[in-house]
Amino acid sequence: MKRLSLVGLFVISSVGMVIGQTEKPIHEIHAAMIYNFMKYVQWPDDGSGGDFVVGVYGEDNVFNTLKSYYDGKPKGSKKYAIRKLNDVSEAASCAVVYIGKNKGKDFENIKNAVAGKAVLTITDSFNLGKKGSCINLKVIDEKLRFEINQASINGASLKVASQLASMAIMI
């Protein structure tokens, strides 16, 4: 388990690589980051035995990659269930919602739909970290980085491991 955690940290820390110098398509990098973020975030115990639902709004390539790699795999006592979201109202039934760059304009509606719920929002759009996304992916000096909005994390009753926070741009 410790080895797996170290591998996850390596994947996240290596994301600071220069865009274009990797052989992996960006949607695969985003999918790996989303998966690793989930390993370093703690959700409150909801007492349900249901699936751990990860919703993807927009970005079909990210959805397809997450679905093929992680759907049905165990997450503690639950299993990952990767779902494509077609409407913002579906976000409230998820533990994680990834909002692709092409759907960033709908962020406020999704934020309102998940308000007060333990939902980790992950975005890939300019300035959405400052507007309330829990985690926002961004390119800085041609390097892929991520921001963590601690107020949004707290508002969703989530906890971020210090290892993840130490690699983030905290806002």
Image (cartoon, grey):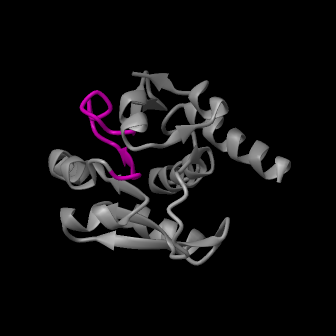
Q: Dividing the image into 4 quarters, which one contains the N terminus?
A: bottom right
Q: Is residue 9 magenta?
A: no
The answer to whether residue 136 of the structure is visible from this angle is no
Instruction: Say above or below: 115 vs 88.
Output: above
What x and y, as percent, mark residue 111? 23, 47
The answer to whether residue 79 of the structure is visible from this angle is yes
What x and y, as percent, mark residue 104? 22, 47
Q: Is residue 121 magenta?
A: yes
Q: Dividing the image into 4 quarters, which one contains the C terminus?
A: top left
Q: Give the quarter of the image for residue 78.
A: bottom right
The number of numbered discs placed on residues in the rendered structure image is 0
Along the horizontal axis of the image, is 22 left or right of 56? right
At 21% from the left edge and 55% from the top edge, which residue is drawn? Answer: 113
Along the horizontal axis of the image, is 124 left or right of 68? left
What x and y, as percent, mark residue 95? 43, 59
The chief SS type of the magenta part is loop
What x and y, as percent, mark residue 80? 55, 70
Q: Residue furthest front?
A: 47
Along the horizontal axis of the image, is 151 left or right of 68? left
At 28% from the left edge and 39% from the top edge, which residue is drawn? Answer: 125
At 57% from the left edge and 28% from the top edge, which residue is drawn? Answer: 165
Instruction: Say above or below: 57 vs 121.
Output: below
At 31% from the left edge and 53% from the top edge, which residue is drawn? Answer: 99
Instruction: Say above or below: 152 vs 44.
Output: above
**Span colored in magenta:** 117-135
